[in-house]
Image (cartoon, helix red, strand yellow):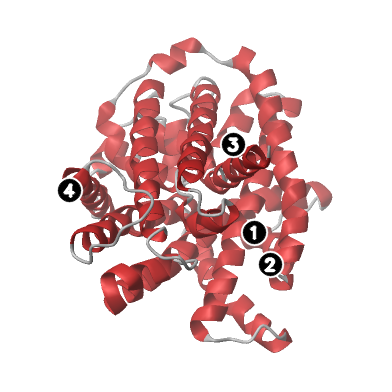
Amino acid sequence: MHRLNRLIGGVLLVSGTTIGAGMLALPVSTGLMGFVPSCLLFLIYWVYMTTTAFLMLEVNLWSESNLSLISMARLTLGKWGAAVNWVIYLFLLYALTTAYIAVGGPIFLEILQMALPLALPTWTGVIPLLCIFGFFVYRGTKSVDYINRFLMLGLAVTYVLMVFFLTPHVNPALLTHQDWNFLPIAVSVVATSFGFHIIIPTLTVYLERDAALMRKTIAIGSLIPLVIYIIWEYLTLGIIPLHGANGIAHGYEQGANGADLLALALQNASLALIARLFSFCAIVTSFLGVSLCLFDFLADGFGIQKNAKGKLWIYVIAFLPPLILTLTDPRAFLTALEYAGAFGVMTLLGLMPALMVWRGRYRLQFESTFKVPGGKLLLIGVILFSVTIMGIEVANKLGMFKHLISSVDY
């Protein structure tokens, strides 16, 4: 029974870390491909990210002590590996924080405008997010844990309500659309929706270094988000039109999120409210988790004491750069997720685990209680896939796929 309880707890930890506000971008970034291609892309990423999680687990079990992502890189790749990991990790946290502030601002602006019948400027939407929920981050882990439990419950309830009430509104004809030409604009954002690797050190301690139990936990815990995402795609792509002012194509161009487009497409106040509440819970839970990681990472990395003055400095350092990016880029939500996926997730959670296993297994001759099968061929495949996705996003940022969007009839 004790082992079963730990399995359930571990599975929830993996699933909860994986599912977040990133899924709000999935319909917008993948919708132009269509439902079936999107599901196949999800399956590919699930296999890839689960594999790299197993690789990271192998590295983590090489040492008897509890290793962080930075410590694992230092153990296998040396000081340069630890330094590169540190920079990429900081970049990823900043990119995700920017995305969540950018998507959270409009949600809170709507709430402000409902309470105050005034024409408020766009930037006012970020004030509640940074002042109210940023305060919980400022207070620390206990405060975040308290509010996060409530919001996670809200996220689960609103998701179930959406599945129940929105399924009858799905138009099967919308789900038949397929166009693989739009694959390049989707691959980076989807990557951000399958990452949970940062909790593997915590999971190792929680599951008492039981390799078999950890494998099962990672496999089941990562499978749950895959199922949830496929259902989410079914609902959104089956309701939101491809074209029009509130369609998927225009939403991608404007950097909108799927829940907002869903609410606009429903033309039903009650159902739209459920979609917006789901969006609110997803955004805030993700913001709290990532911001807390960024807060602690900056404190440890720069040696800042967590007294009143120190925490105020960390607060400014953590939120000022994302705030500036949000206010200067109207498409900041999708842009930040694209950068996070291609240059953060694919490097830190994809490329680096393969490099660490390669050097640790074949150069340093480390042994552990768990070894990922597939040998060098698997590692080469992971490395090539990671580099390919990064290359696609570089091409995307250089405007090589701009013709795809310009060809769409809004």
**Residue 53 vertical position relative to residue 224 in the rendered view, above or below:** below
Callout 4, which amino acid? Lys
Query: Is tag 1's residue or tag 4's residue first in the polypeptide sequence?
Result: 1
Residue 3's disc is: none
Secondary structure at numbered mark 1? helix
Work out whether residue 319 can be spotted: no
* Residue topped by disc 1: 288
Q: In this figure, which residue is indicated by the disc labeled 4? A: 376
- Disc 3 secondary structure class: helix
- Name the residue type under label 2: Val
- Foreground: 180 or 381? 381
Q: What element does badge 4 sit on?
A: helix
Q: Which residue is mark 3?
A: 259
Q: Would you say the residues marked 2 and 3 are in contact, meaning their CB atoms lie under 8 Å apart?
A: no
N-terminal of the two: label 2 or label 3?
2
**Mark sitting earlier along the chain (3/4):** 3
Q: Is residue 381 left or right of residue 305?
A: left
Which residue corresponds to mark 2? Answer: 137
Q: Secondary structure at mark 2?
A: helix
Q: Identify the amino acid type marked 3.
A: Ala
Mark 1 surroundings within 10 Å by alpha-carbon count, few (fewer than 14), some (14 through 19), many (20 or more)? many
- Taking the image as drawn, is residue 202 in sight? yes
Q: What residue do we see at 44% from left, 69% from top?
A: 90
Q: Badge 2: how crowded within 10 Å, few (<14), some, or many (20+)?
A: many
Separation of residues labelled 2 and 1 (CA atoms) = 7 Å
Measured Cα–Cα span from mark 3 to mark 1: 19 Å
Nearer the observer: mark 3 or 1; the answer is 1
Compute the Cα span from label 3 to label 4.
42 Å
Neighbours of disc 3 within 10 Å: few (<14), some (14-19), many (20+): many
Picture residue at 40% right of the left edge, 72% below the top: 86
